Image (cartoon, grey):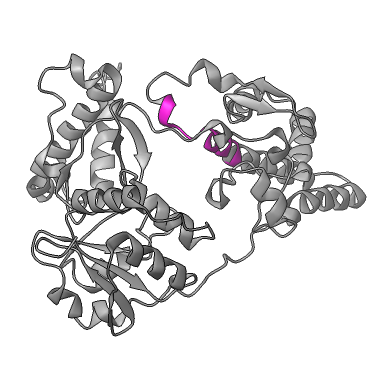
């Protein structure tokens, strides 16, 4: 007796029902629970699509698509601004990895040397390719042993070298593979040194495959030798605890609320030096004041200049650069009428109500410089010096 033919797709149907039973509540119930969040997701998706279109085609080629979006408003600075498109974020020609970086160790590795790693990386955060020569040698040996193609991973390492590749221990700089893509969106905004991180999971998989094969070797001597080789590859790159430092305390001038008598609504407080991506401690002042005042400077990505180049931090001004330079060892210039006029112009640009100098290294040089630029002595309020610069103040 012949069996009746099963309905077409019956096996798939049973598997689908089993999957739904395994998931528990019905998908409709799950969607009903997510329904309140869908409008928000839709707005962010539209904003992301707008940003992508503007990035690829440019704001001048897309009518209406690149207008400021209300859900991307940024507040808390000297004024309310809108996130507008910019065509790239420049990181410089040294954002790629030196060939030496691939065989050296990161500064916070067991065998790492901060001085060596610092010379081979953009900054401590970008030490992405420091696998160390033992681990790379171990990976090559495993590839040969297991004979698996790793062309794609090798390409990732090559791309991470950046648009220019310095030849170690020489003054020679060769064009790198990244130059082929450096002007293409979105590659022009990528920190190419990070591409090397693609190899981290690959090396992990190679290590797992090698250990699996090593543990199945026949002789104890070979197993011991293999495990020692794996240990020698991993021990040098074991991570050390991150270094920490005490954050500079927020001035009592801020925590006590005294600032309210110096900064009116719509005015900005100008800390010295201004916060930027390199040193943003003053942003904590705003947090302690529950964002009660606007702050000049900051840390974000935004357009700068007529070409709308993407930069980190607020638009640089002569006064902010001068205060930063003097704070970190620069020689104060001779204050003349030109510098005074520039200082007034920059303070007006920030809509400044008060300039605040907390106690810090070189605060004497900074106080004398600002006094010369503004033409009057500051008030000492608790643990800071304050210059009133809002409308109606002498200039």
| Residue 194 left/right relative to 204 | left
| Residue 4 left/right relative to 146 | left
Q: Quadrant of the N terminus?
A: top left
User: 176 or 306, which lies in front?
Assistant: 306
For residue 113, above or below residue 90: below
Look at 17% across and 53% down and name the residue there.
75
Q: Quadrant of the C terminus?
A: bottom left
Spot occupied by residue 316 in the image (x, y as percentages of width and height): 34, 45
Asked whether 14 falls inside the magenta stretch, the response is: no
Q: Quadrant of residue 111?
A: bottom right
Spot occupied by residue 355 in the image (x, y as percentages of width and height): 26, 66
Look at 15% across and 32% down and name the residue there.
46
For residue 318, above or below residue 45: below
Q: Quadrant of residue 267?
A: bottom left
Q: Which residues are magenta?
A: 187-200
Can residue 272 be spotted in the picture?
Answer: no
Look at 24% across and 30% down and name the residue there.
85
User: 383 or 367, which lies in front?
Assistant: 367
């Amino acid at each position: 007796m012949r069996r009746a033919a099963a309905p077409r797709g019956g096996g798939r149907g049973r598997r689908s029902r089993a999957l739904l039973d395994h998931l528990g509540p019905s998908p409709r119930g799950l969607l009903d629970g997510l329904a309140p969040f869908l409008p928000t997701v839709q707005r962010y998706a539209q904003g992301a699509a707008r940003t992508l279109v503007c990035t690829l085609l440019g704001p001048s080629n897309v009518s209406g698509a690149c207008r400021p979006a209300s859900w991307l408003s940024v507040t808390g600075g000297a004024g309310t601004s809108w996130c507008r498109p910019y065509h790239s974020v420049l990181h410089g020609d040294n954002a790629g990895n030196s060939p030496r970086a691939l065989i050296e160790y990161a500064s916070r590795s067991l065998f790492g040397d901060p001085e060596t790693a610092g010379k081979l990386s953009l900054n401590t955060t970008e030490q992405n390719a420091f696998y160390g020569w033992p681990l790379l040698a171990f990976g090559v040996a495993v590839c040969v042993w297991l004979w698996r193609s790793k062309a794609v991973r090798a390409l990732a390492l090559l791309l991470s070298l950046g648009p220019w590749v310095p030849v170690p221990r020489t003054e020679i700089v060769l064009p790198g593979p990244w130059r082929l893509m450096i002007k293409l969106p979105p590659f022009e905004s990528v920190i190419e040194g990070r591409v090397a991180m693609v190899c981290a999971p690959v090396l992990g998989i190679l290590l797992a495959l090698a250990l699996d094969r090593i543990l199945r070797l026949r002789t104890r001597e070979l197993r011991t030798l293999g495990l020692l080789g794996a240990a020698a590859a991993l021990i040098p790159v074991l991570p050390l605890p991150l270094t920490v430092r005490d954050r500079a305390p927020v001035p009592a001038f801020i925590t006590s609320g005294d600032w309210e008598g110096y900064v009116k609504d719509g005015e900005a407080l100008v800390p010295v030096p201004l916060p930027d991506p390199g040193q943003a401690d003053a942003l904590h002042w705003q947090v302690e004041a529950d964002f009660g005042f606007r702050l000049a400077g900051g840390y974000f990505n935004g357009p700068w200049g007529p070409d709308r180049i993407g930069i980190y931090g607020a638009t640089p001004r002569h006064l902010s650069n001068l205060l930063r330079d003097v704070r970190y060892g620069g020689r104060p210039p001779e204050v003349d009428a030109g510098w005074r006029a520039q200082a007034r112009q920059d303070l007006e640009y920030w809509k400044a109500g008060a300039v605040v100098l907390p106690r810090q290294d070189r605060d004497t040089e900074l106080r004398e410089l600002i006094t010369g630029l503004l033409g009057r002595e500051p008030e000492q309020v608790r643990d800071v010096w304050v210059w009133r610069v809002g409308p109606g103040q002498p200039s």
